[in-house]
Image: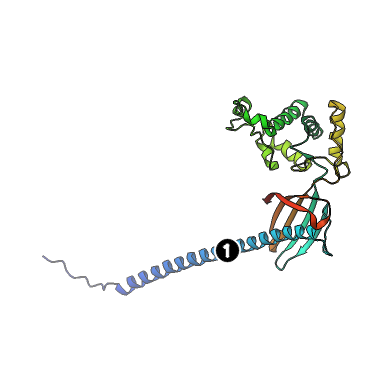
Amino acid sequence: MPAPASDEPHDEPGFALLIVLWSMALLALLATQVTSAGRADTRLAASLRASAQLEASADGAVWETIWHMLDGGGDYWPPGAASFVLQEPASKVTVTVEDERGKLDVNQVPPALLQALFSTLGADRSTAQAVANAISDWRTEEAGDRDDDVSSPYIGDGKIWGPPGQEIQRLDELQMVHGMTPALYLASLPYLTVALEQGPWLSFASPTIVAALAKAKRDSNVSVDNADQRGPVVLRIQAKATGANHTAVTRNVWMRLDGTLSGPAWHYRILAWEAG
């Protein structure tokens, strides 16, 4: 027997309205997500563009500094310690030039002087001596010819390399030397350089370098020859470009000038270019 028909009308308009409302809510949610993602992408693109502009400003300031130091006319800047500000359309670039001639060339100075520096900076005697000797092994050509280069000290450190028997090209290589700690590396970094091939020039030496020289002389009777005034000049150029909202990009460039100290006659070589 068929069921009796219901007298209550179906609420089809209300059900359809509910579906429409849910659909509109879903579309609104999707639109919000798309808009939010678009805004995030826009902010990211703007940040990348601003960063690229700051990098270009910092790089340009480095090249402008080098150009002025090589210029023989009225725009000549004598190479040496200096600081100045360059105003760019979208940034301000602060340039600092540091003369490296008062530092220790890590490829040239004897281990006893490196040991004296590390001791002056607070390292204990055994650590200072071990790290100084390890640096000497690292840079010594004969060291790279031994069969046991990757030997007990480096294997004990869990490393797969040994002394390459080549000069140190960049100071951050020192972090790879056996026994060098992060603290000692950071402490000694301001007093070391590469490619100076002599020195340090006492007229440019810091009190820490002077103390290390005195200690090496007293403890090991080690001294350095007087610097050749016609020798190379090694400079560190730091360019810091600052933009809106205090965003900043830094370039650190080490360069070497060779020649007769006669401005435009100098030859120069970029030793290292680091971004920060």
Residue at disc 1, secondary structure: helix
Q: Quadrant of residue 166?
A: top right
Of residue 7 and residue 190, the one placed in the foreground of this image is: 190
Nearer the observer, 255 or 20: 255
- Dividing the picture into quadrants, the one containing residue 135 is top right
- Residue with the mark numbered 1: 45
Where does residue 139 sit, x and y in percent of width and height?
Answer: 69, 34
Quarter occupied by the N terminus: bottom left
Specify the amino acid type for callout 1: Ala
Specify whether 89 is left or right of 44.
right
* 107, above or below 153, in the image: below
Question: 10 Å neighbourhood of mark 1: few (<14), some, or many (≥20)?
Answer: few
Q: Residue at x 76, y 57 (%)?
A: 66
- Residue 184 percent coordinates (x, y): 73, 36
Residue 41 seen by the camera? yes
State the image quarter where residue 125 is shown.
top right
Query: Which of these two is toward me, 167 or 235?
Result: 167
